[in-house]
Amino acid sequence: MPSETQETMNWTLVSTGQPLRLIPQPVPEPQGRQVLLKVTHCGVCHSDLYFQDGYYDLGQGHKLLLADRGVQLPMVPGHETVGTVVAIGPEAKGVSIGDQGIAFPWAGCGSCPRCLSGNEHLCFNPVTLGVMRNGGYGTHVLLQRPEHLIDFKGIDPALAATFACSGITAYSAVKKALPLGAQEAIVVVGAGGLGLAAISIIRALSPAARIVAVDISDQRLALARSTGAHASVNAGPDGLTKRIQEAAGQPIGAAIDFVGSTATAGAAIGALAKGGKYIIIGLYGGALSLQLPLLPLRAVSVIGSYVGSLGEMRELVQLAKDGKLAPLPIERVPHNDPNRALNRVRAGGLEGRLVLTADL
């Protein structure tokens, strides 16, 4: 067991709008059913930028602040974590020192109806890694329960780390979009790490579905086609809704939006066939004006999708173990330089994902 006085240096957000700082913090000691991991890999998620900035853009001059979500600083970011078990609480069962696993970050209180039904990611009192509790940009993370440690044997640990957010987020969104009707297409807006993961998952779960990728980068669209998209549309020029429909060449049963801007939402909803589903995940920000009578007349559904459940994450990992997912481009970067990694994500243009790696 680590001593309560043992300290480590963690990359910490001390104040919003500022780079992370290395500050000393005690290594946590697991209690009850808790499990302590030493971090080996941590994905650099685009949502970490919103955490660093301290707000989400709600459009029309409105913001959702970190404080509004109950986040208290200082806090260590990082919610896509793989690590090795170095200590366990006295009541933790089914886990041993030296075990490796993916940390399921979307922990809830563990006792409310949502948690007990398997939907703790929707708990009203979350204890999310990297948001409400110190995450994988530090040297250690503390899991609330041993079942939050997911075995990834046979999978590259850097790729496995991304399953904790981009992977599970894409998987949960795809499951909301499926099943499609006969001869219906599905649109994936955004061909970054999440969009590429979604395309691979759609191919695994619905092989017959025609997939249309939408992005502003021709380079990422080429990568989307190599991952399994049948057609692609550059979002830059005008007339995006019509061009999406033309690329689909058949009714569009669902659109999954990993950007989440005013422009992408309007275009994707407009492109849907009658009875279609619009699933929004992206947090780019903005506001959406809808002609309300058209929602019931077209029987269109607008669905928000937030990460995914522990059960869905286990299903995703099993798909990867079974070899049913296309490889995602991964670049390993030093764990001791997260500010540079965050700046690269902010600059855009990345293909795939950056993963902080402790042994670089």
Image (cartoon, rainbow, N blue to C red):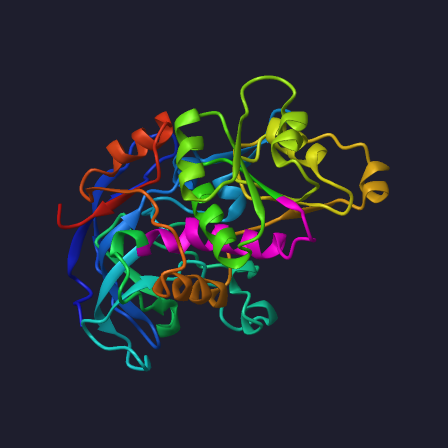
Query: Is residue 183 within the magenta segment?
Result: yes
Of 261 and 67, nearer the camera is 261
* Residue 178: quadrant of the picture: bottom right
Please indicate whether residue 84 sits to the left or right of residue 162 in the image. left
| Closest to the observer, 324 or 31 | 324
- Secondary structure mostly seen in magenta is helix
Query: Picture coordinates of residue 114 (x, y %)?
Result: 59, 67
Quadrant where the N terminus lies? bottom left
Q: Say whether residue 168 is visible.
A: yes
Residue 260 drawn above or below residue 182: above
Above or below, 287 against 306 in this view is above
Q: Nearer the viewer, residue 135 or 82?
A: 82
**Of residues 154 and 349, which is closer to you in this image?**
154
Magenta residues, start to end: 160-185
Q: Position of residue 4 (x, y in %)?
A: 20, 65
- 347, above or below 358, in the image: above
Give the left or right position of residue 178, taking residue 159 as reference: right
Q: Is residue 198 magenta?
A: no
- Residue 46, by quadrant, is top left
Rendering coords of residue 60 (x, y %): 64, 25
Tell me the residue at 24%/60% (across/down): 83
User: From the image, which quarter does the C terminus lie in?
Assistant: top left
Q: Is residue 154 left or right of residue 251?
A: left
Q: Residue at x 43, y 56 (%)?
A: 128
Residue 316, position as x, y percentages in the image: 44, 61
In this rendering, position of residue 214 left or right of residue 8: right
Q: Quadrant of residue 354?
A: top left
Determine if residue 135 is in view: no
